[in-house]
Image (cartoon, grey):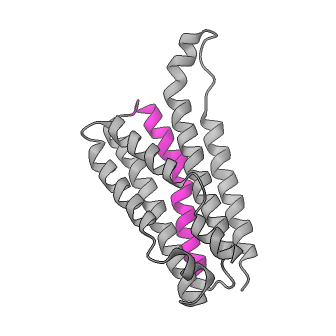
Amino acid sequence: MKANRLEAFTDGVVAIAITIMVLDLKAPPGTGLEALRAGAPMFLGYVLSFINVGIFWNNHHHMFHATDHVDGKVLWANLFLLFGVSLIPFAIRWMDEAHFAALPTAFYGATLALTAFAYRLLERAIIACNGPASKLAEAVGGDWKSTGSLLAYCAAIGLAFVSPWISIAIYVAVAASWFIPDRRIESRLKA
């Protein structure tokens, strides 16, 4: 099976997730700067979530450009990734409505960790389908960046109960580390 149908389906689900997030944004209840200030945490949470969804989509796109074939395991792994992405709008909404309390902030981290884990499973399923000498396998190697991100998310989940803002800082740091798409795949595709 070719990967283009799976990519198109993923693009559609990601677009829906982003649409749900933007529809959850509410206009400030007033017209002054105080109203903007009051809505700033939710807006910044939206920006972080938008960036995270974009990071998963961008890296997914690069990963599939290094993929020749997909099988049933790849399809299911991709659905698992999309499940994680689809939880991000719910997690950010809960964080906002609970005013960035510990449990919703930890749940946001758990959602990101689940999605990162699913991405890792998808990567492994693609490598298993395309072989250890495939472009993707050669590009990602041991994939320490993914592992480090997953560990950071897990630490942030626990730290949310110490200070939600520490967790949010970790979520921002992980997003910043992934902001530029995985250069290993781009380099391999150019070679």
Above or below: residue 24 compared with residue 132: above
Residue 58 left/right relative to 76: right
Q: Is residue 79 magenta?
A: yes
Residue 163's quadrant in the figure?
top left
Q: Point out the image quarter for the N terminus.
A: bottom right
Query: Residue placed farthest to the top in the image?
Result: 32
Chief SS of the magenta region: helix
**What segment carries the magenta color?**
73-100
Q: Is residue 190 left or right of residue 136?
A: right
Q: Residue at x 60, y 86 (%)?
A: 134
Task: Find residue 27 and report its horizontal and vertical position in percent.
Answer: 63, 23
Query: Does any portion of residue 30 appear in the rendered image?
Result: yes
Write the residue at 65% across / 47% down: 18
Horizontal side of 149 relative to 11 (left or right) equals: left
Quadrant for the C terminus in the image: bottom right
Position of residue 156 relative to residue 70, above or below, is above
Q: State yes or no: residue 89 in magenta.
A: yes
Q: Residue 60's quadrant in the figure? A: bottom right
Q: Position of residue 19 (x, y in %)?
A: 68, 45
Q: List x then y, in percent, for residue 170.
A: 39, 45
Name the one closer to the observer, 64 or 141. 141
Determine whether 83 is above or below 189 in the image. above
